[in-house]
Amino acid sequence: MLKKKKPFVIAIDGPAGSGKGTVSQKLSAKLNYHYLDSGSIYRVIAYAAQKENIEPGSINSLVDLVANSNIKFTAKNIWLNGDRVSDEIRTELISKFASEIAIHDKLRTAILDYQRSFCKLPGLVAEGRDMTSIVFPDADLKIYLNASVHERANRRYKQLISKGNDVNLSDLTREIVKRDSRDKDREVSPLVIVKEAWVLETDDLSENQTVDKILGLFKGI
């Protein structure tokens, strides 16, 4: 009997602003793999919760909201109940809200099957905070992208300014430090460096250089 072929999974974790989003998108395009941006799932939930005036601590309401929402990802857009929300979920306010609701175990469990549904042939590039540890613990290649707080704040500042947002670099730096603390210190699915992960420091690397380094690791397997 022929052994059923399994999708090849590249799981990428890292703190906010480490470049994992753009790097993962470019990597998935080069490999023609599926792509999971797990952070955007929490952003969509945060956006939906704000519209419904649901507080970050209202766990049961958030879980019910997920059950009754239709979240869809296409090649270039993100949809919530038929409405395109790709730009609306990229504000700092939504980022903060998403980080606050991501601490809830019941909510993380509620979207676990949805996250894993992205794993299809020929393969998947999945990025987030707990891709290597919880969502895809058996991933074929595990990467942890890192960068200094200063570098990550600068990247986020440039990104937001380019989209016409009025932001302050000092405020962004403080928020990134807070998000790091929430991500690393939470009891449920904290951001960790698993022992199998390749750690890449990206302060002095361009996005394309980072992609090339991961492709080198991929080809070496």
Image (cartoon, grey):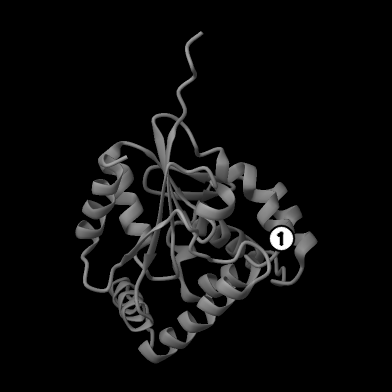
The amino acid beneath tag 1 is: Asp
Image-quadrant location for residue 122: top left
Q: Does 189 appear above or below 183?
A: above
Image-quadrant location for residue 183: bottom right
Q: Does 100 appear above or below 39?
A: below
In the image: residue 210, left or right of residue 190: left
In the image: residue 205, left or right of residue 201: left
Image-quadrant location for residue 173: bottom left
Identify the residue at image location x=31%, y=56%.
23
Q: Position of residue 14 (x, y in %)?
A: 44, 65
Counting every numbered tag in the picture gives 1
| Residue that extends furthest to the bottom in the rendered view of this protein | 170
In the image: residue 170, left or right of residue 158: right
Identify the residue at image location x=57%, y=49%.
135
| Residue that extends furthest to the right in the rendered view of this protein | 60
| Residue that extends furthest to the front in the rendered view of this protein | 195
Q: Does 107 appear above or below 27?
A: below
Q: Position of residue 96 (x, y in %)?
A: 55, 75
**Quadrant, the C terminus:** top left
Q: Does 73 appear above or below 191?
A: above
Q: Which residue is mark 1?
A: 105
Give SS at disc 1.
helix
Identify the residue at image location x=28%, y=48%.
217
| Residue that extends furthest to the top in the rendered view of this protein | 1
The crowding category of the residue bearing disc 1, from other C-alpha atoms within 10 Å (few below 14, some 14 to 19, many at least 20), is few
Q: Position of residue 51 (x, y in %)?
A: 64, 65
Identify the residue at image location x=33%, y=79%.
157
